[in-house]
Amino acid sequence: MPINFETDIQYLKGVGPKLGALMSRNGIKTIKDLLENYPRAFEDRRAARNIASLKENELVSLKAMVMSISSYAMGRSSRKIYDVLIRDGSGQIRCKFFRTPYKGYFERFKTGTEVRIIGKVTNYRGKLEFHHPDIKDVVPDEENVDQLLPIYVEIEGFSSVKMQKMIQSAYLQLKDWPTEILPPSLMQKNKLIPRKQALKEIHFPEIENAEGLTTLTSKAHERIIFEEFFWLELYLASKKMGLKNEKGVAVQNKDTINLKLIESLPFALTGAQRKAFEEVKKDMQSGKPMNRLVQGDVGAGKTMVSFMAALYAFESGYQTCMMAPTEILAEQHYNNAVKRLEPLGLKLGLLTGKTKTKERKELLEKLIAGEIHFLIGTHALIEDWVQFKNLALVIIDEQHRFGVAQRGYLKSKGQSPHFLVMTATPIPRTLAMTVYGDLDVSIIDEMPAGRSPIQTRVVTESKRSNAMSFMAEQIEKGRQCYVVYPLVEESEKIDLKNATEEFEKLKHQFPKIRFGLLHGKMKAQEKDEIMTQFRNHEIDVLVSTTVIEVGVDVANANLMIIEHAERFGLSQLHQLRGRVGRGEYKSFCVMIMGYAVSEETRDRVTFMEKTNDGFKIAEYDLEIRGPGEFMGARQSGLPGFKIANLVRDFALLKQARDAAFELLANDPKLQKLENKLVREELLKSYGPQALAGVG
């Protein structure tokens, strides 16, 4: 049967149901998926190497003989490191694996057999090694000198060579190639080659294109990377234009109440806070709905900017609501608002899951009458019965914790209200352009005067007892401490310390210290009770999972101990560290790494000792882990780029973004004939909402 891009993979000649099911489980369901399974690297057989010539950070291909295969435990854990020692005529080198690629992987190789090693050379404690290289059997007639071979990710024993043959088969059988979707004018302006040509060049590489292909800068790569960025940027551009077409509340006044607020503060606003508020104020005056993200480090003063926005709305007779992810955080914002804003005439309300029925009724009456000017709460704010007289401003704290639907519910409670979303997770500008492309971004990159940096130390498991002794010393001085673990209960698959078990051990080890346990499996009421006890200093040490990443400020807590720090992303470590240093006491963060971590992991975690700047940490984290890992698979909102990289390909990202915005500026509804296929593809990828407001 003839095949096309949408043909199920099992119907490709030579595949069948069994292999088709394997491919499908790994995301290759159609011929299109197969052709978009791009090589992860290219093996340049012109540069056939020997072990003696290897240099750090090189991606190399070489033949060698297996000398031994062994394994040993990682420290005290049950996890194993696998070690394959290989040798050629010039020397020997170790291939180390910190996890098994798949069951039976190491049983494939016998001592004395010749193999081909493809991988990056790593310097580990002064010795060159391969970490997780591809090890392949040498094909008997293999003499592919002067050849560039694509290397694909192996799928459960289905080798890179077999993948290449399957792609070649598809390419030969595919007669009905899809029409080029991108308009000719856009391709010409951005110097893009046709998609069909790009796919051919990347899967069947020519040796003369070796430099561009191996560095992922070839014309084929440029075309594919540009297009991956383009569809996302076009979607974001359409959303942004749709928002700009809406009419919003024009809030305009002399802003005299904020002057009184600033005079009443015991500290001076930073220049970054003032700049962010001016950007917010300009948006609120425009008559178009504001959609602005304010991002900055923990303690940088985002909440004060949001309070000033609420006062600005209040001065024109409008209401504001603020949604926080937890009851404790909502209460904290409410208490701060009562202290700072109530003396200026603002009437406040608090709505959480704990608010009783009678209070809710009174709250609703006051909201509808306009007697509450600023309502602060949790997701309870989106309930149908919550109605306002004239809501003009919606503030969302830690916006990545709420979905688009929840923002939509709040939007429906006013006439296209202004949205101000805040996050204490510093996001690199490169990522913010993509993830929050439909929002304008304000960055607060200055810290208030007088905040001393948190002293950070990274130690290995062997120094854990010293960290706990230091904890006891701080408790003796009247301070409080957090001890954070990556797991709630012991896992059979991953041998890590866990919060519940270590909580019991610590209580036994330090009987005079008052310990509390907090984790995500607890009910909301239990969590609140524990955090209230900690805040009231009825608990000295809070043993917790990352549930305290975004939490209440406890000024007396000056020590954060993080177990298995290697299991956390750097931005998450930074968020956890930000829980201390909130008061007048010198504060500390001790990050404990498990046994037998790689040199790369050690370097990543010890970066935390070098800076307290969340933006520098975020840039570094993004660079080494990539956008999907950085944001978290479910939180990122990224479309799952197959080859594009936001850091490496930033120039192409900007190019694709400019092209997308220009296309919509010239044809907002994508109705021109040359944009017909673009419109269809956009709606197919993102649904009817893709052109909402403009199409």
Image (cartoon, rainbow, N blue to C red):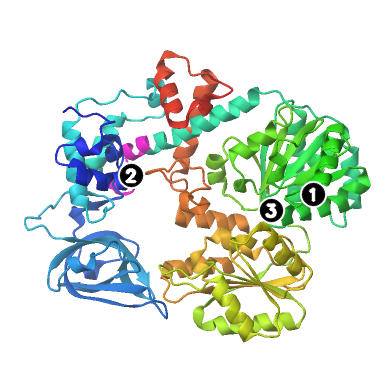
What is the x, y in percent for residue 175?
A: 19, 26
Report whether residue 271 is seen: no
Q: In this figure, which residue is indicated by the disc labeled 2?
A: 27
Ranked by sequence position, the earlier of labels 1 and 2 is: 2
Q: In this figure, which residue is indicated by the disc labeled 1?
A: 356
What is the x, y in percent for residue 87?
A: 18, 73
Picture quadrant where residue 200 is located: top left
Viewed as shown, does residue 462 lie left or right of 303? left
Viewed as shown, does residue 350 lie left or right of 177? right
Q: Kindly identify the amino acid type of the residue bearing the numbered disc 1.
A: Lys
Q: Residue at x 30, y 49 (%)?
A: 214
Q: Kindly identify the amino acid type of the residue bearing the numbered disc 2.
A: Gly
Q: Select label 2 or label 3 by which is in front.
A: 3
> Is residue 216 within the magenta segment?
yes
In this picture, which residue range is highlighted in magenta?
A: 210-224
Q: Are marks 3 and 1 in contact (CB under 8 Å)?
A: no
Distance from label 2 to label 3 (Cα)? Answer: 36 Å
Main SS type for the magenta part? Answer: helix
Q: Kindly identify the amino acid type of the residue bearing the numbered disc 3.
A: Thr
User: Around disc 1, counting alpha carbons within 10 Å, would you say few (fewer than 14), some (14 to 19), or many (20 or more)?
Assistant: few
Q: Select label 1 or label 2 by which is in front.
A: 1
Ranked by sequence position, the earlier of labels 2 and 3 is: 2
What is the x, y in percent for residue 430?
A: 53, 45
User: Around disc 3, counting alpha carbons within 10 Å, would you say few (fewer than 14), some (14 to 19), or many (20 or more)?
Assistant: many
Which is more toward the observer, 622 or 35?
35
Viewed as shown, does residue 3 lie left or right of 552? left
Distance from label 1 to label 2 (Cα)? Answer: 49 Å
Mark 1 secondary-structure assignment: loop
Q: Residue at x 10, y 57 (%)?
A: 139
Mark 2 secondary-structure assignment: loop
> Is residue 606 within the magenta segment?
no
